[in-house]
Image: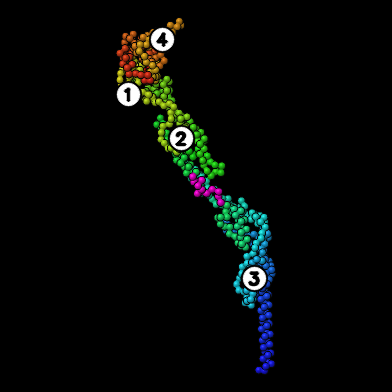
Amino acid sequence: MKAGGHKKLKITLISIFSCLVLIYLAGVWYFHYHLLPGSRINGRDTGWMRPGEAEKILADHEETILLRLPAGKTETLTGSSIGLSFDYSEGLKYEMKRQTEILWFIPETGERKVFPRAGYDNRKLQNAILQLPEFGEEETEPPQNAYMELEKGKAVIIPEVAGTRLDTEKAIRAVEAAIIRGEHEIDLDKEEYLLQPDLKADSRRLVKQTEKINRFLSTTVTYWLYDGTSETLDGDTLCHWLKCSDDGCFYYLDLIDLKIRCNAYVKMLAHRKNRTYDTVEFRSTQLGRRLIPAEHVKFGYEIDETAETEELYQNLVNHLSTVRKPNYSFAREFNDFIRSGYVEVDLVHQKVYCYMNGALYYTCDCVTGLYSEQGRHTPVGVYSIQEMGREVTLKGRPDEKGVPRYESHVAYWMCFYGGYGLHDATWQSSFGGERYKTHGSHGCVNLDYYSAGQLYSVLEVGMPVIVVGEEAYE
């Protein structure tokens, strides 16, 4: 080849190379300010574009936020409804720095994700969320607190119910955080976003109070009563003595109210169980079973309401279960009254019987009140020795001049009612039989001197005296 041909080839090659270099350098310069060929960001073709152009493309559609809600529901927030805007400039700057413009001739592959800096109107966001039906009261159920219930005399805890109503504040914070992260789907179908009950079944306060109430309700007080029956105060009744808190979640014990209820219960018990008797049944030695008046010696039993109220209150406050008799202000049964000993005066047979510890100790004849004068009848009834004395002068009621109608000296005097008593009567020539019909006393029980002495030796004040046989004066 000629020298001129070589020179032309050389110049041509240099020119081509220089053009390629210029083209390359131009590409380097160009793609220093533009995105590389093949660039795809957020699903959009952004190759050969300046960042500003790419930002317009990325932001040229309506952004939406999908909310996944409880019960499989979903709601969508549009960008315009919450004043949503996105700034992709920082992300695109990062993409520009990331790309290698010196290799601009090699196309980009793959998808790139650019997260924008989000902006929104806080007031619009809150209003948009609050207007969603899932945040309203009509289509959602509020959470229900755990609470204490009374069942069959025992306190039990009814567990809380979560409900379906979302916690507005938490939901708004979650949406705000997601928007800032550039997320378009937010899962609010989680327990953490639901309104939570204020009181749960495992609450220490609820558990402790339930245990305390059950200690109270497990206390039982059983009364043994004089009539042979029993009454038991237990949880079935005590549960009605508890008060409920204003929020309906707790039962508690009001100690002032408890004292009032204890008193009311004792009054009820006393009203039902107190007994006093006007007549008693007595087994006479010869007359058999008799109902005789008991107006002068009180029989029966009466609960001491003050003392029993206090003791019952202490039992319940201190959780002391017990089986016991109530406190009685008075308690006396006729059989207990005569158990250790008594004197029976039989008007029909004109006999006196003295029993000691259930066995006949002494018996003798007597003369009782005069049959023919009603005012001198010996009164039938239950009495007890009121006083005793030796060498006593008995005086009758004074006449119109104030002079005693009679005066009688006795060696042994055993008074059992008013001016009536047992005493020796040495003026009587005989005792027993029907002598009382013609030579009866003024109402006392006349005895021979020896018998009066025998009785006086064993009787004492308080000893029962039973007078039976009213038919003797019929």
Q: Residues within 10 Å of mark 4 (few under 14, many from 20)?
A: few
Q: Secondary structure at mark 2?
A: helix
From what the image shows, is residue 274 above or below residue 383?
below
With 425 as the anchor, is 184 left or right in this view?
right
What residue sits right under mark 2 in the picture?
Answer: 314
From what the image shows, is residue 224 above or below residue 179?
above
Task: Tell me the magenta residue range.
Answer: 196-208
Q: Amino acid at mark 3?
A: Met
From what the image shows, is residue 131 above or below residue 365?
below
Q: Amino acid at mark 2?
A: Gln
Residue nearest the observer in this picture, 69 or 22 = 22
Query: Residue at (54%, 50%) from the top-left corner?
Result: 161
Q: CA distance from mark 1 to mark 3?
A: 123 Å
Q: CA distance from mark 1 to mark 2?
A: 40 Å
What residue sits right under mark 1 in the picture?
Answer: 357
Residue extending farthest bottom = 2
Q: Amino acid at mark 1?
A: Asn
Q: Of label 4 and label 3, which has the lower sequence position? A: 3
Q: Of label 1 and label 3, which has the lower sequence position? A: 3
Contact between labelled residues 3 and 4, with CB atoms less than 8 Å apart: no
What residue sits right under mark 4 in the picture?
Answer: 396
